Every structure is written in structure tokens, then in C-alpha cells.
Image: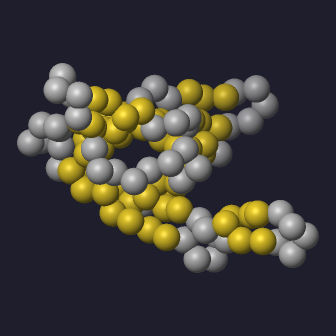
Amino acid sequence: MLPSFARQAVARVRYPMVDDGHGNLTPNLDQPDEQTVEGCSVQPGASAEVLAGRDAALIQFTVYAPAHADVLASDSVRYNGALFSIDGEPARWPSATGTLDHVVFLLKRWEG
């Protein structure tokens, strides 16, 4: 169970997979399924700048979400108006009693 100060919300964006006409499944970017996940704590992560001939910055956040959060590694997440990808598999943390307590996942987005 997350503490009472976890009052932020993120939007999970999932693109349905459709046949591309050649037998391959590809995401349908025109019809995303967007679901709000409330009761989160979103914490800033490390950022990095790439200076090798270009201006780019990696923006990262760690999201602590309620146990019922329906998020997959293949999803995107909208936070503060920006679209992020999920970095790795969401970690589902059990409580001391063995029930699922919360879900943690990392967000990343490149700018520049």
C-alpha cells in the first residue's frame, strides 16, 4: 500500500496490435487505449545529456503505482503532458503479508 501522499496520476497508453496485411502484428497508433492510473508517486530520476555532436537529454522518472495498475513494458505513459516509454518490465512488489503491495516502473524520454 502506498502512503497517503501518493496523489499523482499518470495515463497508461496502450496501442492495440493489428495485422499489417503481411501477417505481422504492429501497433495501431491511431486508436490508443488510454487509462488513468491514480494514487501514484512520481519521482524524478537521473538525467543525461549527450554532447557528441548533438544536443539531446534523457528525461527519467520512477513511478510508484497502486497494486491494481495495469501497465506493461510495451505501454507508453503520459505524464505532465509528455509521452514517455516504460524502461524495462514493471516490478510488482509484494507486501510482508504476501499480497501485492505496489508496482514500480521507470519512464524515459529523449529530448533534442
Q: Quadrant of the C terminus?
A: top right
Image height of 42 relative to 45, above or below: below
Residue at x 43% of width, y 58% of height = 12
The residue that appears at 49% across and 70% down in the rendered structure is: 33
Q: Is residue 104 left or right of residue 26?
A: left
Place of residue 110 in the rendered image (x, y in percent of width and height, measured from the top left): 60, 43
- Compared with residue 83, is residue 32 higher up or lower down, i.e. above or below? below
Left-right relation of 24 to 78: right
In the foreground, 55 or 23: 23
Residue 88 appears at what percent x and percent y? 55, 35
Q: Position of residue 25 (x, y in %)?
A: 76, 63
Quadrant showing the N terminus: top left
> Does residue 82 show up?
no
Q: Is residue 69 above or below residue 61?
A: below
- Residue found at x 65% / y 38%: 56
Percent across and percent down for residue 52 are 76, 26
Examine the rendered structure and indicate whether residue 62 appears above or below residue 16.
above
Rendering colour mode: secondary structure
Query: In this view of the protein, which residue sits in the foreground, 29 or 46?
Result: 29
Q: Determine the residue located farthest toward the front in the rendered image.
A: 98
Q: Quadrant location of residue 99?
A: top left
| Furthest residue in direction right, as rendered | 22
Q: Is residue 11 visible?
A: yes
Please give the count of numbered marks on the rendered protein. 0
Instruction: Identify the residue at horizontal 83%, vertical 63% (top origin).
Output: 24
Residue 72 left/right relative to 99: right
Q: Residue furthest left?
A: 4
